[in-house]
Image (cartoon, rainbow, N blue to C red):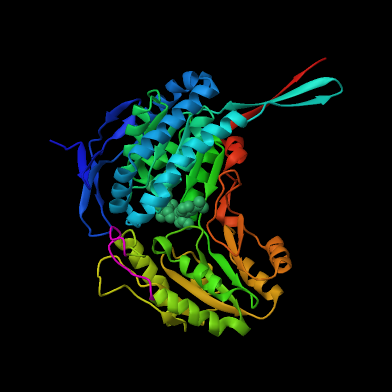
Amino acid sequence: MTQHTTTVAGVEVDTRHWIGGARVASAETFADLSPIDGATLGEIARGGAAEAEAAVAAAEAAFPAWAATPRAERARILHAIADGVEKRIEDLAKVETLDNGALLRSHRRGVMPRVAHNFRFFADWLLTLGHEDFDTRGHTNQVSWDPAGPCVLITPWNAPLMLATWKVAPALAAGNTVILKPAEWSPLTASLLADIAAEAGLPAGVLNVVQGYGAEVGNALVSHPGVRRISFTGSVPTAKRIAAAAAANLTPLSLELGGKSPLLVFADADLDLAADLAVEQYDNAGQVCLAATRLLVESSVAEEFTRRFVERAEALVQGDSRDGASDLGPNIHPRQLEKIDGFVRRALDGGARAVIGGGPNTDLGGLYYRPTLLTGVAQDSEIVQEEVFGPVLTLQTFDTEAEAVELANDTRFGLAATLATGDPECAERVSAQLVAGTVWVNCFFVRDLQAPFGGSRHSGVGREGGTWSFDFYCDVKNTVTAP
Ligand code: NAD
């Protein structure tokens, strides 16, 4: 008989879908492996077209009542979900760590509290959304934010629950129903979220979670004509497939994609700060969409900057993500490790030099890749142009501000950029010229959920965050009334 639950780090997790307020099994399953030691964490339900159909039907059935639920009541339930997340931070942190290999201490202190905050923030923001009124020759225009309908939310494995709830919370707050499909490499915390939401009193069918492969259940969901919004975070090739499927039904899309962001270090920068910022790019073993993986350093300080960077990078401890001493855990999957190493091999074959790292950590074995810095890389080379999604940085130098901007903008991405400079005017001039959804000046990763988040060019379509999320998840309506 198929087992329907698995116990991970002492926490029981249901491995089935959550559809219409009930657990639903599939005939087939797939194995979920831990990146830390390769252990099988569970056999997960492998959804297909039938499960996608059932989930959309459940979301359609639950939509009218949830959309009609007063905002204050929706907000109350979202806060109750946040309470549930806060009560289970330890469970969620341990399960996520085994499932995706990111550091336990980050999950405990940063990520899971942020998951709860995602719900609280959008619950509160919902209550501030005004009915904007304006006047045209005595006629009143009243702008309202109507729920759109069932939303399909498709998420990646690098920050599974954080990225999922960044979409689930505003979609639910707006009065929509949701079908969440987590990544097949990190399916577990989405299942725990379904339990937490049910306990918090979210009505059946308002949040549905389906498990399985992107090409199977994922494709069936994004191709479904009953879906009113698709929000996707993941890679560019998948985004193109999803956009093509959505086009058939003209389903509005929000796409949060990859990046190849620069860190520009000017000669007048605090070089200790700049080196700290650069080393931070190895967080989550480099599996961060926003990571500034291209270090662009003014020639006159390149040697000193590199010295300070290497000193810090060499002090990083690589090891089991559950160990509080570890700074860098494993990468997610053998396929990802191969992909990372392929990029580095080809760069080295093409004449690049590894200042540090340059291959897997053979002392540790498994999926650990040494933090790597490559120099001697050409602007048009693959390693400078393509997202590696591993602990691999490149370093190039520039001599003028104009050259720095040119190098920074010269990829097909535009997600983020970081500047290290002691000159506020330089920061203002340069940030105005950068193609990026977010620019950080002398800081990195500081996020306010009120602010817009997204990417330009191949880094994404649309913005989410604060009112931008409600713009996307609502049908915004204008009602014009005669005097
Ligand atoms: P991916 O594109 O391989 O998969 C993402 C999700 O899409 C998974 O749930 C997968 O099952 C699903 N999927 C795959 N094919 C599908 C299809 N045909 N139809 C529907 N769904 C499908 O990406 P990944 O490897 O999981 O994630 C890494 C990528 O995500 C990187 O490029 C990274 O930069 C990006 N990312 C972006 C952000 C951001 O906010 N911009 C945040 C995190 C990660």
Which residue occupies the foreground of this view, 6 or 30? Answer: 6
Quarter of the image that includes the N terminus: top left
Percent from the top left, x then y, of residue 146? Answer: 59, 26
The residue shown at (44%, 79%) is 311
Q: Is residue 314 left or right of residue 149?
A: left
* Magenta-drawn stretch contains 174: no
Q: In this view, does 452 lie to the left or right of 478?
A: left
* Residues drawn in magenta: 315-325
* Magenta-drawn stretch contains 323: yes
- Magenta portion: prevailing SS class: loop
The residue shown at (53%, 36%) is 122
Percent from the top left, x then y, of residue 204? Answer: 37, 23
The residue shown at (34%, 37%) is 87
Q: Is residue 205 visible?
A: yes
Instruction: Give the residue furthest to the right.
Output: 137
The residue shown at (34%, 65%) is 337
